[in-house]
Amino acid sequence: MFESLSEKLQNITSKMRGKARVSESDLKEMMREIRMALLEADVNYSVVKEFVAEMTEKCKGADVQESFTPGQQIVKIVRESLTELLGGEEGEDKLKVSDSGFNIIILYGLQGAGKTTTAAKLAKLLKENGKKPMVVSVDVHRPAAAQQLKVLSDSIGVDCYIDPEEKDAVKIAKDGEGKARYMLCNYLIIDTAGRTVADEALMEELRDIAAAVNPTEKLLVVDAMIGQEAVNIAQLFEQNIGMDGFIMTKLDGDARGGAALSIRKLTNKPIKYICTGEKVEAIEKFYPQRMADRILGMGDVVSLIEKAQANIDEEEALKAMERMMGNNFNLDDLYSQFEQMKKMGSLKDLVGMMPGTAGKIKDEDLDDRIVDRQMAIISSMTKKERRSPSILNASRRKRIAAGAGVQVSDVNKLMAQYEQTAKLMKQFSNGKGGFKMPKGFAKQAAKMGLKGNMGGLGNMGNLGNMGGLGSGMGTGFPQGLGSLSAPKDTDDGTPFVPAGRRDRKKKRKGRR
């Protein structure tokens, strides 16, 4: 979503980082470039004008001019200003909670914004946080809306109330509320109808529903792909119904992202959640500072760890880590790591959360189909081959390539990646089934503020606390990502022979 803006802002801030002295012309040039980058990202003109003016004043302050590192100070100001534009440093704006313990969330939005899918996503997120949600569809205009919500809710194990025969949206909402209270649910999520345009008939229906159920939270689902029009829609709904916040959808698309940067400033309402894909798990709380860091290429380690903890089987990760530390790492383990990576999201998103990777890895190396191909190759192997990769000779690799629908060179690339990872694990092993801290890692981790309480990232001796992220990084981050492209000596498609087998062949030849 913010790819173009992110690249431009990173280029601008990187120019400033190393400057020992910042002149008036340097500041003027930087502000001009930031202004152009934001306008090209489809950010509202008045928002850009105010943002640049405020940042210019901060950069001219005595703290910057008298600093030993003025360039770094300016980068800090850009980060703080972008965080403020997105909502401030306090973190995500949490959902309101009713004193009675029963909460009603109404989702509004135009047709095609993704309300129905978002209702299921939000219900799944609440369920994972220990709540008991129910969803109800009051869309009496779109024929398959209710059934779509029912299918989605069944897939995530959440109660759903629909009444396809009833044509009164207000009655369905009231009946749904009664059913949710009877089922002792503590959250009811109401999926309302949408239109291609926000007309008075729609607004009247939505006002009647809100008056009937007295919602705890009214959230507008906004399609980030529609650009500046999203701001106009937000203002229209705010004037007619009143909003408590927004859920931005389709942030995984290729739109320029200006809506997300404009909507908070112009409506003074927070973005509470963002959706980054079509799957029901592709929703997360919106943290302004984390998003600002991602845009500026500073990474988002906390969100990366949270994704790992939510999506990775800790028990399985611990078993895999024990095998790795005992030098028993095989292709079944590598396949498991690929599966865990896929659960966490797209490669591009995950790499974007890692500090220092911005612009260093090509987009073509972050194609998720690469991982799918690697998994297909491993699936084409026999159980014996996966557990004893050393037996993979040229004829076996040819058969595996045919079974997976790839070239022999692709199998060779995978095996090169496997051997590099196995070698890395061997280096980190202390020979007793434990983990040996890499030289200088503890000091670097301390500098980054990554200590044991951050899911175990600082304490590499207890990688299991990270929900498997440590083992995933061993095989896919960054070692695996870097080795998804083949070494030069295997590009011609000739069978790759592991070093161990070459040595054995030389010994046999010497004995003859």
Image: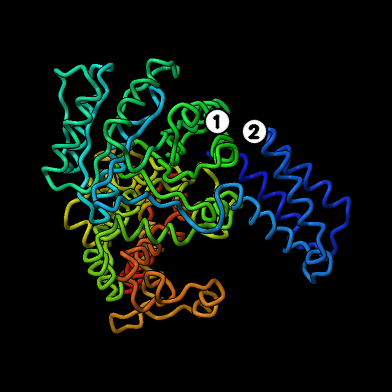
Q: Residue at x 40, y 41 (%)?
A: 275
Which mark is on residue 231?
1
* Label 2 crowd (10 A; few <14 / some 14-19 / many >=20): many
Which mark is on residue 44?
2
Which mark is on residue 14?
none
The amino acid at mark 2 is Asn
Q: Secondary structure at mark 2?
A: loop
Whether residue 2 is visible, yes or no, is no
Name the quadrant of the C terminus: bottom left
Direction from residue 387 to residue 21 in the image, left or right: right
Closer to us: 421 or 492:
421
Q: Is residue 33 above or below residue 308?
A: above
Direction from residue 222 to residue 435 in the image, left or right: left
In this figure, what is the number of numbered marks? 2
* Label 1 crowd (10 A; few <14 / some 14-19 / many >=20): many
Q: Is residue 496 above or below residue 449?
A: above
Whether residue 128 is visible, yes or no, is yes
Direction from residue 67 to residue 243 in the image, left or right: left
Q: Residue at x 29, y 51 (%)?
A: 339
Kindly indicate the quadrant of the structure image that contains residue 444: bottom right
Closer to us: 266 or 385:
266
| Upstream in sequence: badge 1 or badge 2 | 2
Direction from residue 183 to residue 436 in the image, left or right: right
Query: Is the Cβ of the residue at disc 1 closer than 8 Å to that at disc 2?
Result: yes
Instruction: Give the Cα separation between the discs numbered 1 and 2.
Output: 9 Å
Q: Secondary structure at mark 1?
A: helix
